[in-house]
Amino acid sequence: MKSRLQKHSAIYKSKGDGQVQGRYSRQMLFAPIGEAGQLKLKDSAVCIVGMGALGTVLANHMVRAGVGLVRFVDRDYVEQSNLQRQMLYDEEDVRSGYPKVIAAEKKLRKINSDVRIEAIVADVTVQNIESLLEGMDLVLDGTDNFQTRYLLNDACFKLGIPFTYGGAVSSRGMSAILVPGRTPCLRCFIPSADGGGQTCDTIGVIAPVVDIVASYQAVEALKFLVGADGSRRNSLVTFDLWHNRYYEMKLGEPANNCPCCQLKQYPALDPAEQDAAISLCGRETVQLAGSGPLDLALWRERLEPATVQVSSNAYLLRAELPEGERLVLFPDGRVFVQGTDDVVRAKTLYARYIGS
């Protein structure tokens, strides 16, 4: 791997063979990794974007496996509803109101003090995405909305950094590893996502599906980091645990005229393509432009099971949220998040209830 992390190999070896064998002995006994692969892991750097359900499993695997540098980024804080499936958090984190990355860092440092951990509290945007990925060997997708996934996809393919895609909702999951120059990008097989996508906060999710998706991502990450190219899976796996369904679709060739991996246009990196978010002065309200017209009758049906109260008329829909804020939806696609003037907070709630 890259020389910037060669110092980690020296630290790794200086611990003494007994300690190295003790911590990673079972992993090193696995022949495809072995001692050489373990040293490659120690010289590797990964970035996990999103530290919710997928991200906490991914971070746990990467830190326990001995990846030298694990950086993770998230904009949200720990809430009680996270505890059902976000494995690094507990009730004390909820009471403390810790940002997710800070709570995760505290846990993971107790698990493996040899690993360098960088916890970054931030909203991933066009403005900061490339700096967040600088120096990374691999990016792991722990996000919960396609707007951020497309941003990751385009940045990774522009910078030549592979990333592992993962998604989980209800009892369904999917995963693939996408390698610039070797595989299609995310846009090739999921070219767009409409604004009516289902999310965990509207139709729920069971924890086992999260663990499986993240484990698929983690094992492909390990294969890539140790150089086991011949063992990498060249397919998109999708499954439904509750209904006992499993599918595997070969990634195949890139889509003709893909704006990302073929035309090198990287549309998600164009600031003009980003949704506008404006804090309305003096109103404790953030306006988000949205991604298209909203059918208010349809959105009433979707939001009623997940919110405290929904009311509507011909012009707008109001949804009182369990978190205390209120969403106001307009037919032209605009959404007000009332009860906060924090743009990052408003974007979190928008992604949670409206989706990408």
Image (spheres, rainbow, N blue to C red):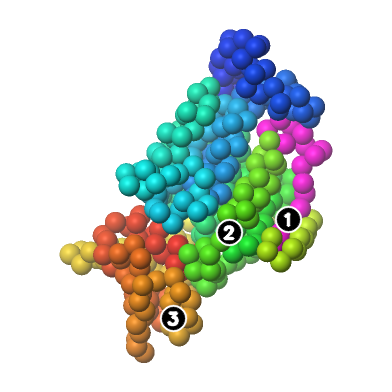
Q: What secondary structure is found at the residue carrying circle 3?
A: helix
At x 45% / y 62%, what residue is drawn? 351
Q: Where is residue 158 in the image (x, y as percent from the top left)?
A: 59, 46
Q: Earlier in the sequence, mark 3 or mark 1?
A: 1
Residue 265 located left or right of residue 21: left
Q: Return the residue at label 2.
A: 206
Label 2 is placed on what type of residue? Ile
Label 3 is placed on what type of residue? Arg
Give the magenta-colored segment's residue range.
223-240
Residue 69 located left or right of residue 94: right
Identify whether 257 is placed above or below 134: below
Packing grade of label 3 (10 A; few <14, some 14-19, many >=20) is some
Q: Return the residue at label 3.
A: 300
Packing grade of label 1 (10 A; few <14, some 14-19, many >=20) is some
Q: In which quadrant is the N terminus drawn? A: top right
Q: Which of marks 2 and 3 is nearer the N terminus?
A: 2
At x 32% / y 44%, what residue is drawn? 96
Label total for image: 3
Question: How far apart are the alpha carbons under marks 3 and 1?
Answer: 33 Å
The label number, if any, that marks residue 237 in the structure image: 1
The answer to whether the residues at label 2 and label 3 have Cβ atoms under 8 Å apart is no
At x 35% / y 55%, what residue is drawn? 344
Residue 118 visible in the snapshot = yes
